[in-house]
Amino acid sequence: MRKSFSPAAFLEGCRDSLPMLIGIIPFGIVCGIGAVAAGASPVASLAMSMIMFSGAAQIVATQLLASGAPFAVILLSCLVVSLRLLMYSAAMAPYLRTLDHRWRSLLAFVLTDQAFAGTLQRFRDSDDVGANASYFLGSGAMLWIGWQFATLGGVLAGAFIPASWHLEFGVPLCFLAVLVPLLRDRVSLIVFAISAVAVVALDAMPLRLSLICAGLLGIAAGVIGDKAMRTHE
Amino acid sequence: MSRELTIWLLVFAVGAITYTARVSFIALFARRSMPALLARALRHVPVAMLTAIVVPAIVFSAPSVLDLSPGNIRLIAALVASAAAWWRQSTMLTIAAGMAALWLLQYLVG
């Protein structure tokens, strides 16, 4: 691993991730606020960001915890929201195949939506796997550190800003910022409609299972929608 | 089980889940490619799950009380934020627009 590490590419990765860092800061802050609101101690709130390192999984875990969902349902829901990471893992895998096991295990830990988006193009453009991996690591490390500081900011804000400001409303707003720009094609709109109707209609389900069921129904609608669009053409 | 202990167990259990998802094709099944149906289904995970997370936080004014009227200030604030998100794909702007709308409505209504 040491042989293939390139400090210059690592620093380049750190630098190039700065604009993305600005984008994730609000999300990190709301994760901190959400964790404190769910009754987590400041240390546990930070541990969530250090170990789970996934805004969507952290928010789902804290919201379900706050609403009294059982442990197994929280895990299952986090599993479903983490499925998109499989997609990134599969997309990165061909470029990392020649690296040793330590490199791959480390890079997997810092694989996030942002690190993926920022690094994939470089892997496509260049054959220098060591430099690319170092760049990826720099980008991932920077995002990880920024995520911790943002969470800390949220933990402090959650502890000192009065509840009447409703800072927890930042959580759905953060998700809307990601969701709305994705609704640009017909199938995505169908997925949105099915998930939205299902999560409301299934609200009475026990154990807060409505989240998983609505998500899975939306995914199924998307697969069927894709097929219908293809046969239509 | 105390809340704090539950949270710590969650930290490690969910941490294991997210790491397993990340490492899956990179290391665990590095030699296999993803089944086509799984690949097609995964493309819809972000929209389906984000919707299922966001919608209840907006349309329920209290637990299990569906409120789609203009009197639901969270719904209105979320629509303002969505318009901002559509216009400029900026997290910061979306949050600013939504929170500003919420505070303004809170002031006007309450």
Image (spheres, helix red, strand yellow):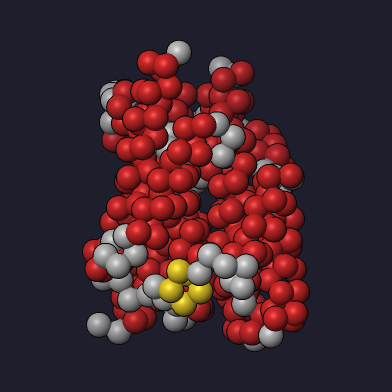
Q: Is residue A194 visible?
A: yes
Residue B49: image location, x then y, percent: 42, 50
Residue A92 position within the rendered picture, expressed as x and y whole percent measured from the top left: 46, 29
Answer above or below: position of A200 versus B6.
above
- Residue visible at 51% across and 74% down in the picture: B61
Indicate the position of residue B109 as horizontal and vertical percent values.
70, 81
Q: Position of residue B34 (x, y in %)?
A: 32, 26
Above or below A86: residue A76: below
Residue A222 position (above or below residue A141)? above
**Does A227 sit left or right of B69 as displayed?**
left
Residue pictured at 51% horizontal, 45% vertical: A112
Q: Residue furthest toward the top?
A: A233
Q: Residue at x 57, y 67 (%)?
A: B69
The foreground one among A1 and A113 is A113
Q: Quadrant of the C terminus of chain A?
A: top left
A77 sits left or right of A22 in the view: left
Residue A161 visible in the picture:
no
* B105 over B51 or under it: above or below: below
Q: Residue at x 55, y 31 (%)?
A: A185
- Image mark count: 0
Furthest toward the front, the residue is B69
**Which of the pair A25/B88 is nearer the observer?**
B88
In front of the other: B83 or A59:
B83
